[in-house]
Amino acid sequence: MWSWLVCRAFWPSRALWWDAARHFWTGRIRLEHLLWAATINIAVLYVFGMIPLTGVESSFTITDYWRWWVVHLWVEQSFEFYAAAMSAYLLMGLGLISRNLAERAVYFEIILVFLGGVLGTGHHLYWAGAPNLWIPFGTMFSFIEVLPLVLLILESIEQRRLIKAHQEFKYGLAYNYVIGAAFWNFVGAGVFGGGTLNAPLVNYYEHGTFLTLNHAHTALFGAFGLLGIGLIYFCLRYVAGDRYAFKEGPGYTAFWLYNSGLILWITLNFFPIGWAQLNAVFEHGLAYARSPAFYATMSIWQWLRIFGDVVFAIGALLMAFDFFMKLRPIFPEHLRRLLPGALATDPEPGAGRLGAGATRMIVPGSPES
Ligand code: HEM
Ligand code: HEM
Ligand SMILES: [Fe+2]
């Protein structure tokens, strides 16, 4: 359904759709095609997690093999592909870079993401009963995976420079989240995943410890959570247009609360337990390191997690409230009825219907496309 909505938004009429299809099949593959392909890619890969479609597979190795098609190929291939294409698309749509530059950068990143991400699946198959072949393959290709993440961070530094040079930039808040996502993609996925856990010798001992948990939270929330929130703020800023005030304060506060939450988690919970757990694996083996006996020695650090949790949760509540208030241009009457007084500054009733007064971003089928 999401793919279909994206398709409708890019090519709203049948004629435009045919045009786009013709371009695609004749090799003129544009950024819009890639973004749409990324949505299909995400949907299709999910299906592999359901193998065998009828019944339950009796071999754990085979079930786990397909599970990684979803976990790994989703995050390290489809989502990375989507993230690279989306951030280039936004920059192009806002007129900060040319289509040519955006497309060239995305093609290069996609080649690296696919090259590293697909065979990089091997880093989950080292100790899961799969053939030994995966040890060299998984290691080599997952080190390649770090390259596009480095490119993304270099690009986001450049993006900040472009935005700073642009006097009246309306999407500052949304972009802040996108740049935050690039940062955590590099740190959470590149450093904590690729740099810390990935080498087979390290992975053998740290497997399934709090160091994995550290990587999982910083990469999944840091990279894709922040990206998703940034995209929502983009849409909200777009519908507010020039007619509605758009307060950026709560969004920025939520951003810093989220980041502080992540840092508190790392310093008070993931690292103190993770490194001690690694040591416990060296000394007493994995079974002990993952047993309640080990966790009982760490109860102080388990409780200290609460600081990060509370800070993170306040950020989430603030953001949810902010989203709700910013729905005003889409549901002006409903919000006026729910919150009389709070919305006294609304323009005339019904004036702010979706898109009214919003600045045009992308024009599908324009001479550029
Ligand atoms: C933003 C992208 C990424 C996300 C969201 C992500 C997420 C995750 C998650 C959730 C797990 C735990 C899965 C489980 O145990 O069931 C995991 C494990 C792992 N990830 Fe990532 N990952 C990302 C990128 C990377 C990259 C780029 C690498 C290496 C190049 C990597 C290497 C690993 C390894 C080696 C494990 C296994 C850890 C263990 O032995 O328990 N990840 N990842
Ligand atoms: C207040 C918020 C949160 C709390 C209290 C929390 C807590 C936890 C706990 C207790 C675990 C299991 C740890 C274990 O196996 O020993 C876990 C796992 C996990 N969490 Fe969170 N979490 C929070 C937010 C998030 C967010 C926002 C994301 C990502 C968007 C996330 C992604 C994950 C993932 C992917 C795993 C599985 C990791 C693995 O397989 O090793 N969590 N979380
Ligand atoms: Fe992976």
Image (spheres, helix red, strand yellow):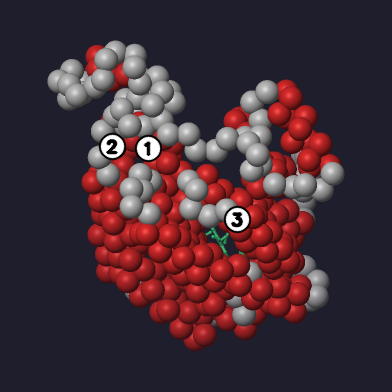
Tell me the tag on residue 237: 1
- Viewer-proximal residue, 87 or 193? 87
- Badge nearest the viewer, 3 or 1: 3
- Badge nearest the viewer, 3 or 2: 3
> Toward which corner of the image does residue 112 lie, by quadrant?
bottom right
CA distance separating discs 3 and 1:
22 Å
**Label 2 C-beta lies within 8 Å of the nearest ligand 2 atom:** no
Q: Please say if 180 is above or below 279.
A: above
**Label 1 C-beta lies within 8 Å of the nearest ligand 2 atom:** no
Outermost residue toward the bottom? 283
Percent x, y of residue 20: 74, 36
- Mark 3 closeness class: few <14, some 14–19, many ≥20 residues within 10 Å: many
- Tell me whether circle 1 and circle 2 mark residues in contact (CB < 8 Å): yes
User: Looking at numbered disc 1 in the image, what kind of residue is underneath it?
Assistant: Arg
Q: Which residue is rendered at x = 35% and y = 44% of the image?
A: 170
Percent x, y of residue 105: 62, 61
Q: Which residue is rendered at x = 63% and y = 69% of the image?
A: 145
